[in-house]
Image (spheres, rainbow, N blue to C red):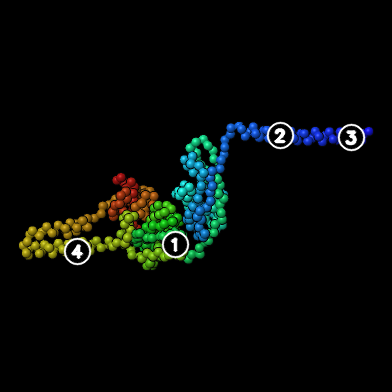
Amino acid sequence: MRLFFILVFFVLNIYAYDNTEIFDEDDNELQSSIVSLMPQDVNTKVLYLQFDKVPSRIIKGEIFPVTIRTLSTTNNFTELVYSFFNARGVEIINTTPYSTQREKYFYDTFYFKALSTGARLPDIEASLISTTNDEYKSAILNGIKLNVVALNPKRNFSNIIANSFVLSDYKTTSFDNMHNIVIFVAEATNCDIDKLKLNNVYKQGIESSTNSIKKSKITYFVVIDKKIENFKFTYFNLIENDFKTISIPIIVDDDSVTTQSDLKPRDQSKEKLKMFIAIAISIFLLILIVWRKKYIYSVLLIFPITYSAYVAIPSKEICIKVGSNIHLLPVHNGTIFETTDKIIYLRAEGEVKDFTKVKLLNNKIGWVKHEDLCSY
């Protein structure tokens, strides 16, 4: 009898447990149905990304493009926004892409600079800014490892890696008794031109630069030994995949640079000779006029006499304030190679915009801002 009651109690417990499971399952389904009927914000995925173009081989220091192909299944947006994270060994140059659209795809190009051989593209997240209150799920494109190789350049490598690097102007003048100064203007494409650095020189620096992805320009100076007759350095050409040599013949001009757009070598060291020639022509014309008694030709004397008088006029003396900076070129925020520790008086050699050219007591040529003159 005791065994019978135990068996009945066991069967009843099993039945109650099964009913509880059935109730719970039905209750969950009911709750799910209720939730699905309630209004809620729908976070829908409408963006799909993939890499369209990634270089197969990259030089360390190179600026390279990466194009992403993006598909959007909705047109209800005003802007496609990208964000970057988890990058390694690369620097992004432009966070706003160069964009084109073909059929239903957006092709967005970003530029990166390779900083190390172990570089990896960042993870890229794309989001839509909706024209309505709809919320769309952002899409993430995982970054990939890049094939970056390092160069093994010679000692005269300029640290420039570019599609092209061309000198547009250059000029050489005397810096001191032992050195010449070479100033040149260069233009480059696909290049971080501010990385320009030359080896085995006395001094060097950037006077001005404009740096952009497509085209860059730099005005650069370098002080070299007077014994050098041809100054050379190399850069790496990405198109030809080879080192190219830039050569500047050293033709010393006694005059100094006047403007950044006028840096080609010019010989202006014979002003006195030109003046004597003009005087000789004037004397010859005067004798010819008296001899032939053709006084109407005397009008021809105006030109050589005027030129001789202009050259013979001494340059005016200027006063330079204490603490004034002597610039290497007539460029604002340019290189300063000397600062006056007292009031000094020098001869003005010329003027360019806001600068006066002077010849210092040590025979170096420099430029002083007009605001640093005592009479300013």
Callout 2: few (<14), some (14-19), or many (20+) C-alpha neighbours within 10 Å? few
**N-terminal label among 4 and 1:** 1
- Amino acid type at circle 2 is Asp
The answer, for residue 340, to whether it is visible in the render is no
Residue extending farthest to the left is: 293
The answer, for residue 109, to whether it is visible in the render is yes
Query: Residue 67 or 253: which is nearer the viewer?
Result: 67
**N-terminal label among 3 and 1:** 3
Quarter location, residue 245: bottom left
- Amino acid type at circle 3 is Ile
Q: Please give the name of the residue rendered at 37% of the width and 55% of the height, measured from the top-left corner.
A: 328
Marks 4 and 2: which is nearer the front? Answer: 2
Query: Residue 259 or 34: which is nearer the viewer?
Result: 34
Callout 3: few (<14), some (14-19), or many (20+) C-alpha neighbours within 10 Å? few
- Give the side of residue 77 with respect to residue 298, left or right: right
Marks 1 and 2: which is nearer the front? Answer: 2
Question: For mark 3, what is the residue?
Answer: 6
Question: For mark 2, what is the residue?
Answer: 26
**N-terminal label among 3 and 2:** 3
Q: Please give the name of the residue rendered at 18% of the width and 62% of the height, measured from the top-left corner.
A: 278
Question: For mark 1, what is the residue?
Answer: 239
- Give the side of residue 344 with respect to residue 118, left or right: left
**N-terminal label among 3 and 4:** 3
- Give the side of residue 360 with respect to residue 293, left or right: right
Question: What whole-number distance in Å separates the C-alpha atoms at marks 3 and 2?
Answer: 31 Å
**Eyeballing the image, is 297 above or below 50?**
below
- Amino acid type at circle 4 is Ile
